């Protein structure tokens, strides 16, 4: 049927028998038209085909099905277009001189389609993994984007090597060259790699998040940005400190946002003239105030006299607030301190004040 169609066309259009770049003109016209028609038909068919493929996954939700359709639509379009083109090519036939080249071209098209499919599957797999680790404190969530780039880069490198191998290029020397080049690049970019690995360690260990109030070494402030090379901290003086990740990964990091409770601790000093009975009554009242305050834990507290010195009676107050918000804790601490001050005034107890000795020098 293919030869009869070609014979009919060349009969009505004799100019199609003329050769162009070594092939009949009718063959070039056939290639252009069949490729365009195959691509258009593939564009119409890729949507229902991707819907059918996504429907095969019955145990996933609607959002995952849409993700599968989105990632597989491109590869399905290419596969469908190649299949339709092969049907056209088999129906019309091709010149003998074009059979070898066409076969190679089709093989390369199928190969690139498979690579494109693998590329889409990588996106699909990692997108689902990222969606399943949406917790802000998830350690894997921060590493997945970097892993996806690495896997994609490896796929591209392997693809290039396979293409060169099929073209008859000796890739053994290239592989050795890549190894030596990678080593040279690693040595030249040692500091950069240290920061990258330091960032990876911070992502896995995850000692803090953006917005956390932390003490990194001697630096105290809020984590403002966690970058690939460095981490920026906004200090209490509102200055911005940038610390390389490899140095930060070796620092002692204290994250105040990870506290499950905040300690309330203070030492009050009372005048030595205070009667012991009144001091004991005051400590008992302090304990009642703390127990009746719903913002403090009742099982962990201590209100005791810890010392007597020339400065006065020293009373230690030790407890834990239930709040983990520093701003809320400041309010809670202020409220209980006001209650303590009111009780001190009610019992007419004086706080200790430093003694003042006046020395008068008299000249002879």
Image (cartoon, grey):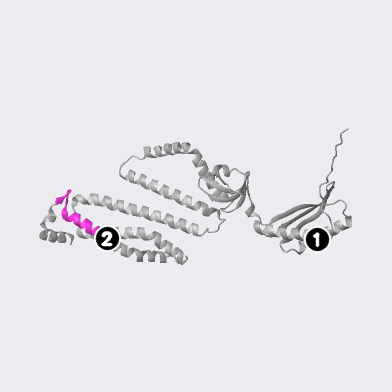
| In the foreground, 332 or 45 | 332
Report helix, strand or loop for mark 2: helix
Residue 357 found in image quarter: top right
Residue 73 found in image quarter: bottom left
Please say whether residue 2 is visible from this viewpoint: yes
| In the foreground, 197 or 48 | 197
Residue at 43 percent of width and 58 percent of height: 124
Quarter the C terminus occupies: top right
Q: Residue 38 carries which label?
A: 2
Give the mark nearest the N terminus, 2 or 1.
2
Q: How crowded is mark 1: few (under 14 residues within 10 Å), some or many (20 or more)?
A: some
Report helix, strand or loop for mark 1: helix
Magenta stretch in the rendered image: 19-38
| In the foreground, 347 or 192 | 347
Q: Where is residue 350 in the image (x, y as percent from the top left)?
A: 83, 54
Query: Which mark lies nearer to you, 2 or 1?
Result: 1
Q: Is residue 190 left or right of residue 219?
A: left
Q: Residue 343 carries which label?
A: 1
Q: In this view, does 299 lie to the left or right of 155?
A: right
Q: Residue 354 carries which label?
A: none
Q: Do the residues labelled 2 and 1 touch (CB within 8 Å)?
A: no
Please say whether residue 325 is visible from this viewpoint: no
């Amino acid at each position: 049927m293919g030869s009869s169609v070609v014979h009919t066309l060349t009969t009505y259009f004799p100019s199609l028998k003329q050769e162009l770049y070594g092939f009949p003109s009718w063959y070039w016209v056939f290639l252009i038209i069949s490729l365009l028609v195959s691509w258009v038909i593939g564009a119409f068919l890729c949507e229902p085909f991707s819907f059918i493929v996504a429907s095969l996954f019955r145990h996933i939700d609607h959002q995952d099905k849409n993700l599968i359709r989105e990632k597989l639509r491109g590869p399905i379009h290419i596969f469908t277009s190649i299949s339709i083109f092969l049907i056209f090519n088999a129906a019309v036939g091709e010149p003998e001189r074009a059979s070898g080249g066409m076969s190679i071209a089709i093989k390369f098209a199928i190969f690139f389609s498979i690579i494109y499919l693998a590329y889409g599957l990588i996106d699909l797999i990692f997108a689902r993994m990222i969606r399943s680790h949406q917790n802000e404190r998830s350690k894997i969530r921060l590493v997945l984007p970097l892993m996806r780039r690495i896997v994609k880069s490896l796929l591209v490198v392997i693809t290039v090597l396979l293409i060169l191998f099929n073209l008859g290029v000796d890739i053994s020397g290239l592989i050795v060259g890549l190894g030596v080049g990678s080593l040279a690049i690693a040595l030249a970019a040692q500091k950069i790699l240290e920061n990258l690995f330091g960032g990876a360690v911070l992502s896995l260990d995850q000692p803090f998040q953006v917005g956390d109030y932390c003490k990194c070494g001697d630096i105290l402030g809020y984590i403002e940005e966690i970058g690939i090379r460095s981490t920026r901290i906004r200090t209490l003086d509102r200055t911005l400190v940038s610390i390389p990740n490899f140095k930060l990964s070796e620092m002692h990091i204290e994250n105040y946002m990870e506290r499950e409770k905040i300690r309330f601790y203070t030492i009050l000093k009372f005048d030595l003239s205070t009667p012991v009975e009144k001091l004991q009554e005051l400590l008992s009242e302090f304990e009642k105030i703390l127990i009746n305050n719903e913002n403090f834990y009742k099982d962990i507290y201590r209100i005791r006299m810890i010392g007597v010195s020339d400065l006065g009676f020293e009373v230690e107050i030790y407890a834990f607030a239930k709040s983990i918000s520093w701003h809320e804790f400041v309010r809670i601490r202020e409220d209980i301190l006001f209650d303590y001050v009111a009780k001190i005034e009610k019992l007419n107890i004086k706080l200790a004040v430093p003694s003042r000795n006046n020395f008068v020098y008299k000249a002879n």
